[in-house]
Image (cartoon, rainbow, N blue to C red):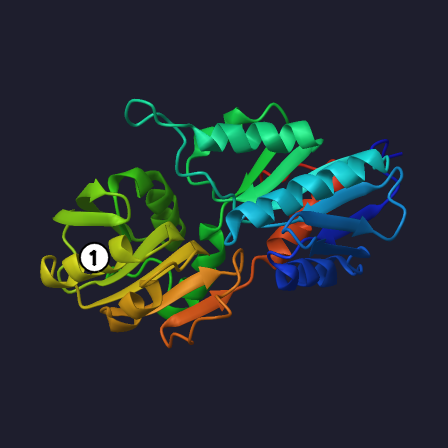
Amino acid sequence: MIAHGKEIAVFTGNSNPALAGSICSELKRSIGSSSVSQFADGECSISVYEPVRGKDVFIVQSTCKPVNDNLMELLIMIDAMRRASAGRITAVIPYFGYARQDRKAKSRDPISAKLVANLITAAGADRVLTMDLHAAQIQGFFDIPVDNLQGGHLFVKHFVSKFGKGNDDVMVVSPDVGSTARARAFSMKLGTNMAIVDKRRERANQSEVMNIIGDVSGKTCILLDDIVDTAGSLCGAAKAIKEIGGAKEVYACATHGVLSGPALERIENSCINELLLLDTIPYPADKPACSKIRYLTAANVFAEAIRRIYEEVSISNLFD
């Protein structure tokens, strides 16, 4: 007998209802009945319209733009489920915001990732399920279990079908030194060599490309990143690969498409042939379509992880 909950119940806030719906379709369940609205002064108002007593509750909510509103929705939904005697509460956070300040880079910096981890735990979450944390050590900021899924695996099938496995004319490129481990694991799955773009960041959201570590001349390159925010780093890396490294063509993929500010214009005007993103963050509804962006869904992976968490089965071999 599973002691922590009688059955699975999946609820969602306003951040990414489409992904939550797809996850429920994979699980062959309907989304839990609830509403998330605002009072006249902007305060978040949550109403849950079905019993959750003793259930294994999963709340799907990315903390993407508007970040603070979506974060408060998540916290208040967790609190509502805890006070309604849910058997266990898992915060399913496809995109974990506030993750980029994970250490004190200079004096008097906050560590906002730790603060948000404390808030989620204090609200009453029993565990967290997320994908591609900006820094792996953020798992240690929580005093509850954290399952950090890897989004790169979802791109492997696409590129293997496009270029084949072990193609000597294809190289995986890490857009910075910090993403080297992620790119190395990705290149091993594709059976290709790897290169690194060495850059120096002058200030937030701006970077200067300095050098290419590895020979990408005449190669088809695949840039792998976790987040595309303003796309300055990604497009700068693609430009360097082409102009400095002499690559034949450049493709890119990233787990989280934040797409702030001039991101879409930069991507459209860049030398990138195609940018693959996962649907952890919905495409900005107020922005025009970008011909170079294509989405893959992460719903099946999250659904399988939810199923295994409920059944107390390991998810470490989810991509084997």
Asked if 136 appears above or below 211 in the picture, the reply is above
Q: Depth check: 116 or 223 in front?
A: 116
Q: Depth check: 20 or 177 in front?
A: 20
Drawn side of residue 29 relative to residue 99, left or right = right
Q: Depth check: 78 or 55 in front?
A: 78
Instruction: Identify the residue at horizontal 32%, vertical 42% (top origin).
Output: 179
- Residue for badge 1: 236
Label 1 sits on a secondary structure element that is: helix
Q: Is residue 309 visible?
A: no
- Residue 276 placement: quadrant: bottom left
Asked if 262 appears above or below 92 in the picture, the reply is below
Q: Position of residue 109 (x, y in %)?
A: 35, 27
Quarter in which the N terminus is drawn: top right
How many other residues sit within 10 Å of disc 1, few (<14), some (14-19) or many (≥20)? many
Instruction: Identify the residue at horizontal 21%, vertical 55% (top origin).
Output: 237
Q: Position of residue 274 (x, y in %)?
A: 34, 70
Drawn side of residue 167 relative to residue 118, left or right = left
- Residue 254 placement: quadrant: bottom left
Q: Amino acid at mark 1?
A: Gly
Q: Position of residue 248 (x, y in %)?
A: 18, 68
Drawn side of residue 178 relative to residue 289, left or right = left
Drawn side of residue 246 relative to residue 296, left or right = left
Instruction: Identify the residue at horizontal 80%, vertical 60% (top origin).
Output: 30
